[in-house]
């Protein structure tokens, strides 16, 4: 269950996220729907501390998404720049990932609260989109994908 659902105020939650960013260079936040089901996960802090878009993952449980986002954030901290349309081979997932620019910054409400307090404009983000076990992307024909895609893939994907 989410911290705010358990009684933490939004201000206290944002303060906890800022403390995590100050300690580690980024934080990972989960978004749940009204039933308390995990919807997607994203980073906060990569923009402020590393000049890089935040990262978002959907269609995976929180633990898997958190692990992958932490791994990618560590690459960013080490100087790696991830770009829209970039294809990554993520061995630990056994599947390829594509970086897709998130078209609506409102998908990252905690990031907007943190950066808004600092006078920054809308924070950019890239979504980590996985191909399925059959090598299909969520926008390709086939069974419905568990991943909601929050941007438009590059034309060649």
Image (tube, rainbow, N blue to C red):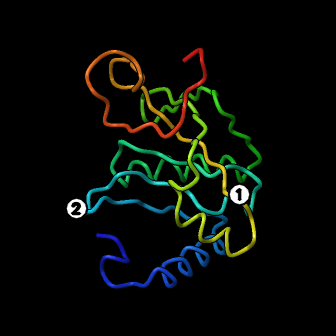
Question: Dot 2: what SS?
Answer: loop
Please name the residue shown 52% across and 83% down the image.
Answer: 11
Cα distance in 3D space between marks 2 and 1: 30 Å
User: Decide: marks 2, 1 in contact (CB < 8 A)?
Assistant: no
Residue projecting furthest to the left: 35
Sequence-first disc among 2 and 1: 2
Question: Residue 30, located in which quarter of the rendered image?
Answer: bottom left
Q: In the figure, 110 relative to 51: above or below?
A: below
Image position of 119 (left or right of 35): right
- Tell me if mark 1 has few (under 14), some (14-19) or many (20+) residues whose alpha carbon lies within 10 angstroms of its own: many
Image coordinates of residue 135 in percent, x first then y, are 39, 18
> Mark 2, residues whose alpha carbon is within 10 Å: few (<14), some, or many (≥20)?
few
The part of the image, by quadrant, that contains residue 94 is top left
Is 143 positioned to the left or the right of 27 in the image? left
Q: Position of residue 51 (x, y in %)?
A: 77, 54
Residue identifier under label 2: 35
Q: Residue 130 in the image: state x and y as whole percent.
A: 44, 31
Whole-percent x, y for residue 81 in the image: 73, 41
Query: Which label was assigned to residue 47?
Result: 1
**Residue under the point 59% across and 70% down:** 113
Quadrant into which the N terminus falls: bottom left
Q: Of helix, strand and loop, which one carries label 1?
A: helix
Q: Nearer the viewer, residue 15 or 11?
A: 11
């Amino acid at each position: 269950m989410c911290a705010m659902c358990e009684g933490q105020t939004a201000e206290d939650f944002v303060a906890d996220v800022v403390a995590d960013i100050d300690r580690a260079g980024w934080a990972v936040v989960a978004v749940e729907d009204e039933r308390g089901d995990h919807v997607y996960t994203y980073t906060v802090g990569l923009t402020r501390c590393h000049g890089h878009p935040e990262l978002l993952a959907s269609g995976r449980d929180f633990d898997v998404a958190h692990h992958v986002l932490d791994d990618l954030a560590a690459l960013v901290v080490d100087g790696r720049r991830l770009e829209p349309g970039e294809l990554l081979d993520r061995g630990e997932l056994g599947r390829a990932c594509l970086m897709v620019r998130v078209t609506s910054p409102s998908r990252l409400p905690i990031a907007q609260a943190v950066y808004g307090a600092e006078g920054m404009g809308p924070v950019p983000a890239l979504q980590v989109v996985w191909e399925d076990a059959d090598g299909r992307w969520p926008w390709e024909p086939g069974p419905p994908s568990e991943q909601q895609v929050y941007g438009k893939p590059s034309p060649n994907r």
